[in-house]
Amino acid sequence: MKAEFQATVTRGAESWQFFAFVFAAFGALGLSLIDDLGMNPTCRIVVKIAYFLSSFYIFIVNVWVRNKLAGFLGWIKREEHGRVA
């Protein structure tokens, strides 16, 4: 029972780390692309805030996307015989 609990806690922590990584990667990419668009500073700030909030909702709050990312993480790790490959 204790080993199953430890595996669940570890997988949960790995999932949140993966969500944070994906959120940061898309955030950095999007914000750098917004800088390259050549908008005026006020418009750029508004677009960056909107991009950040929409990315936060999609990757952190939206349950469907979180489940898909967690499934993708499981596919990447490909557990075999109770061990992480």
Image: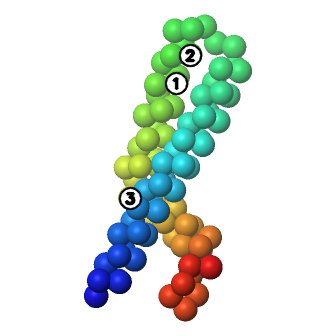
Residue 16 position, x and y percent, is 43, 56
Report whether residue 79 is seen. yes
Residue situated furthest left in the rendering: 1
Q: Are marks 2 and 1 in contact (CB under 8 Å)?
A: yes
Label 3's element? Answer: helix
Q: Residue at x 51, y 31 (%)?
A: 51
Left or right side of 48 for 30: right
Residue flagged by tag 3: what amino acid is it?
Val
Relative image position of residue 47 (x, y in whole percent): 52, 22
Are the two marked residues, 2 and 3, in contact with CB atoms closer than 8 angstroms? no
The residue nearer to you, when weighing 39 against 74, is 74
Q: Secondary structure at mark 2?
A: helix
Residue type pointed to by label 1:
Lys
In the image, farthest residue toward the bottom: 81
For marks 2 and 3, give the CA distance: 29 Å
Q: Is residue 68 above or below residue 22?
A: below
Q: CA distance from mark 3 to mark 1?
A: 23 Å
The span from disc 2 to disc 1 (Cα, nearest Å) is 6 Å
- Residue closer to the observer: 5 or 55: 5
Q: Tags 3 and 1 in contact by the CB under 8 Å rule?
A: no
Provide the residue designation for mark 3: 63
Q: Which residue is painted at 58% across and 87% down in the image?
A: 80
18 vs 29: above or below: below
Q: Residue at x 56, y 16 (%)?
A: 44
- Of the numbered discs in the image, which one, if any, rests on residue 44? 2
Crowd rating for badge 2 (residues with CA inside 10 Å; few <14, some 14–19, many 20+): some
Pick whichever, 71 or 4, lies toward us: 4
The label number, if any, that marks residue 48 in the structure image? 1
Mark 2: amino acid: Arg
Check disc 1: other Cα within 10 Å, few if <14, some if 14-19, many if 20+. some
